[in-house]
Structures are given as C-alpha cells and as structure tokens.
C-alpha cells in the first residue's frame, strides 16, 4: 500500500535532516537565552577535559552531561509552554516550572556525585605520587 500523497517515510533522510534542524534550533535557542545552559556546557567540557587529562573513562561523565543538558532543554521548553498557556502568575504554572527546574537540580547534584566518584581516585593517586 502506498503512503498518502505528500507524506514522507519516517526513514527519509530529508525528513531526518529537517527534524534535526528543528532540534538544533532548540539547542541554539537555549544557548542564546539560558545562562544555566551555557554554564552547564562549560562545566561539561571541563569534566570531559579532566577525563582526558586523568585518563579515565569518559562514559559516566558523558552520560551525566547528556542528562543535565537534556533536562535543561526540557526545562526551557516547559517554561516557554507554561508562559504561553498562563501569561499571568498562577500557582499551577509555578509548580510546573519549579518541578522542571527541580529535575535539572537533581540531575546536576547526582552528576557532581558521579564526578567525585570518577575523579577522586586518579586525583588522589596523582597527589600521592607527587609527594616527596
């Protein structure tokens, strides 16, 4: 059976590129408007550089970075949508915004704990090897 005229396959490269363009526009918007997103990107780059310098596996750090940045993007989307549907202050709108921000906070806190677990052993070994 043929798809309806004008539709494109979900496997279409053209459709994928178009969708990726929309997604990248969201990332650009967050970069341009959200200071926390820029700080989180910078800290993520710092953590990845530390992985390289200490020769530790970057997998847990990359996963934490992806989680925090993804949740920050969802938080930005939740704030924009909440502002659209509720331009005036409303207690339910506050709950939506606070809960989305809370998700970023929890992911950030756990990411710090992962960073401590990943970086403490090599940093201690480096410090102990540098002692006279």
Image (cartoon, rainbow, N blue to C red):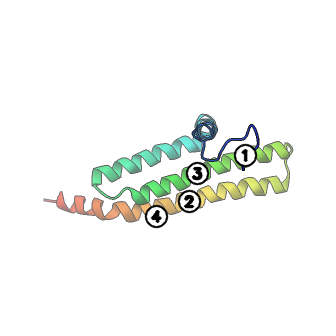
**Which comes before the other along the chain, label 1 or label 4?**
1
**Which comes before the other along the chain, label 2 or label 3?**
3
**Residue sitting farthest toward the top:** 32
Quick one: quadrant of the C terminus?
Answer: bottom left
Which residue is at 29% across, 59% downward? 123
**Which comes before the other along the chain, label 2 or label 4?**
2
Q: Is residue 125 above or below residue 72?
A: below
Viewer-nearest of labels 2 and 3?
3
- Mark 2–mark 4 Cα distance, whole angstroms, equals 10 Å
- Mark 3–mark 4 Cα distance, whole angstroms, equals 18 Å
Which residue is at 84% across, 47% downward? 89
**Which comes before the other along the chain, label 1 or label 2?**
1
* Residue 82 can be seen in this image: yes
Q: Which residue is mark 3?
A: 70
- Mark 2–mark 3 Cα distance, whole angstroms, equals 10 Å
Q: Residues within 10 Å of mark 4 (few under 14, many from 20)?
A: few
Q: Which residue is mark 1?
A: 3
Secondary element type, mark 1:
loop
**Which comes before the other along the chain, label 3 or label 1?**
1
Taking 72 as reference, is 61 left or right?
Answer: left
* Residue 34 can be seen in this image: no
Viewer-nearest of labels 1 and 4?
1
Quarter of the figure with residue 99 = bottom right
Which residue is at 51% across, 52% downward? 66
Q: Which residue is mark 4?
A: 113
Q: Which residue is mark 2?
A: 107
Q: Residues within 10 Å of mark 1 (few under 14, many from 20)?
A: few
Question: Do labels 3 and 4 touch, CB within 8 Å?
Answer: no
């Amino acid at each position: 059976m043929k798809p309806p005229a004008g539709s494109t396959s979900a496997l279409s490269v053209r459709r994928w590129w178009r969708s990726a363009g929309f997604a990248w526009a969201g990332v650009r918007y967050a970069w341009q408007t959200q200071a926390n997103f820029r700080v989180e990107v910078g800290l993520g780059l710092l953590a990845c550089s530390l992985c390289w310098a200490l020769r530790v596996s970057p997998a847990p750090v990359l996963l934490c970075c992806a989680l925090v940045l993804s949740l920050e993007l969802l938080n930005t989307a939740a704030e924009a949508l909440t502002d659209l549907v509720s331009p005036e202050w409303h207690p339910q709108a506050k709950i939506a915004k606070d809960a989305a921000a809370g998700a970023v906070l929890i992911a950030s806190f756990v990411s710090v704990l992962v960073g401590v677990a990943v970086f403490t052993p090599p940093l201690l070994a480096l410090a102990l090897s540098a002692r006279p």
